[in-house]
Amino acid sequence: MLDRVTGMQVFSRAVALGSLSAAAKTLGMSQTMATKHVAALEEQLGVRLLHRTTRKITLTEPGRRYLESAERILAEVEEAEATAAVERMEVSGVLRVNAPVSFGAREIAPRLSRFARLHPALTMDLALSDRVVDLVEEGWDLAVRIGRIEDQSMIARKLASCRCLVAGAPEYLAERGTPRTISDLSAHNCLGYTLSRTLGPGRWVFGKDGGIVVPIKGNLQANNGDALLAAAQAGQGLIYEPTFVIGDAIRSGRLVVVPLDHPPIELHGVFAAYPANRRPPAKVRAFVDFLVGALGPTAPWDRALGLT
């Protein structure tokens, strides 16, 4: 099927210039193709739009009425395209960003004020959710995600590293003892994160490549890292979480790092993801560049812990 908007353009230009050949020339197509576009329009509408002779074209009455509507539609299309082009070039409009709850509240929200000062024509819509959202279906411009992004329809840009540590409150460790090996974890109350396959309620994974699986058990599991942090600080059990979640508690002494005989996993990193099937507008590019500069190359929460 021929494009209807192009057909409107051919029809409108032909009327303005007085011939299909002139319209075809200005639109960069053959006269045969221009004729096909107008014929397709007439077939779709079920009416004749033009009287055509070898010398000139004239409008039919239905063609006169259709021309008014077509010119209005073409003007609206031109305006929409111009608006889209401006948004690709200028950091303006509304930027809809989805991010995990703990990371968004701790590391993104406090930096938005500085980003807003850099781009006063932009409005932010920040949603915090640990659910993996569908950017296209749900209308998000950008998502911040922790760990590997396997969706091939997304472009992912790394923002920062994401290390994990095992830790417990001093009171818990004084009462239950400090584990020295990953096998010692079987004797401890390990608090599990239900949305993770690596740090979940039934297993913790160790080794930088995640190749060592350790069964664990505990009397609390939750779908939010801050909920587990609160329980661990209260002495309920051990926690295995990213350093951006537990770093403040470690620096303040509310939690103590538990070194074991195998290294903790690194969760591939923190990434910004956006659809690969369209050119990202300026507002997306600007925000991703801003986050890369603010969070990398060594994550600020790791630098604060002396992890470089």
Image (tube, rainbow, N blue to C red):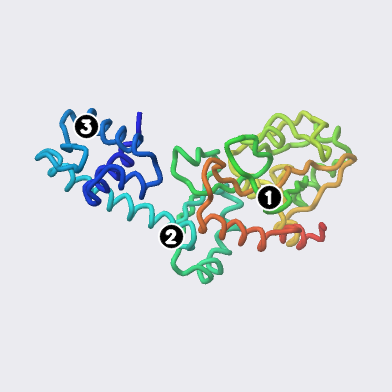
| Residue 42 location, quadrant | top left
| Residue 308 location, quadrant | bottom right
Instruction: Work out how far the residue at label 1 is from the one at label 2, CA to CA, in angstroms.
Output: 27 Å
Across and down, in percent, residue 244 comes to 69, 54
Instruction: Work out how far the residue at label 3 is from the one at label 1, CA to CA, in angstroms.
Output: 52 Å
**214 horizontally vs 199: left or right:** right
Closer to viewer: mark 1 or mark 2: 2
Q: Residue at x 32, y 38 (%)?
A: 34
**219 horizontally vs 9: left or right:** right
**Pointer 1: what residue?**
158
At label 3, the amino acid type is: Glu
**187 horizontally vs 232: left or right:** right
Dot placed on the residue nearer the N-terminal end, 1 or 2:
2
Q: Residue at x 50, y 68 (%)?
A: 119
At label 1, the amino acid type is: Lys
Secondary structure of residue under mark 1: strand
Secondary structure of residue under mark 2: helix
- Label 3 Cα neighbours within 10 Å, binned few <14 / some 14-19 / many ≥20: some
Dot placed on the residue nearer the N-terminal end, 2 or 3:
3
Across and down, in percent, residue 6 comes to 33, 41
Across and down, in percent, residue 183 comes to 86, 32
Position of the N terminus by quadrant: top left
Q: Residue 253 has which mark?
A: none
Find the residue positioned furthest to the left: 61
Residue 75 seen in render: yes
Find the residue positioned furthest to the front: 55
**Pointer 2: what residue?**
86
In this view, the residue in front, 190 or 243, is 243
Closer to viewer: mark 3 or mark 1: 3
Secondary structure of residue under mark 3: helix
* Callout 3 touching callout 1 (CB < 8 Å): no
**Pointer 3: what residue?**
42
